[in-house]
Amino acid sequence: MFPSEVAERAAEFKVYLAYLADRVGVGPAALADVAEPLLDKAFRSAQLTEPRDWHSLLAAYASVSAADLETALQP
């Protein structure tokens, strides 16, 4: 429907995840296997009120915590 807008918001999650990984001390290569499950977690917590409700989507991204990242990295 709005591919460029959706791609822009997905890029924001990548930046958020990279920042979170840096805070935890995880290298970028480790994110390849955990990015999708963490994005899934974020989307499950998203409660959009309308198609252009980007604030709720960003709040959903912020719901992914350092503990979630560390748990996802466990073998």
Image (cartoon, rainbow, N blue to C red):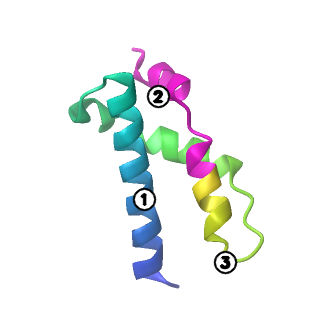
Q: Secondary structure at mark 3?
A: loop
Give the answer, above or below, for where 32 lies relative to 25.
below
Disc nearer the start of the sequence (3/1): 1
Q: Identify the mark nearer the N-term, 2 or 1.
A: 1
Identify the residue shown where x is 67% and y is 78%. Answer: 51
Q: 48 left or right of 41? A: right
Task: Please identify the residue farthest to the right as the structure is shown.
Answer: 49
Q: Position of residue 19 (x, y in %)?
A: 37, 41
Magenta segment = 60-75
Q: Circle 3: is it few (<14), some (14-19), or many (20+) Cα within 10 Å?
A: few
Disc 3 versus disc 2: distance between alpha carbons?
28 Å
Reading the image, the residue beneath label 1 is: 12
Q: Identify which residue is drawn at 46% across, 78% down.
A: 5
Give the residue furthest to the bottom.
1
Q: Is residue 41 magenta?
A: no
- Image coordinates of residue 12 in percent, x first then y, are 42, 59
Q: Position of residue 49 (x, y in %)?
A: 78, 70
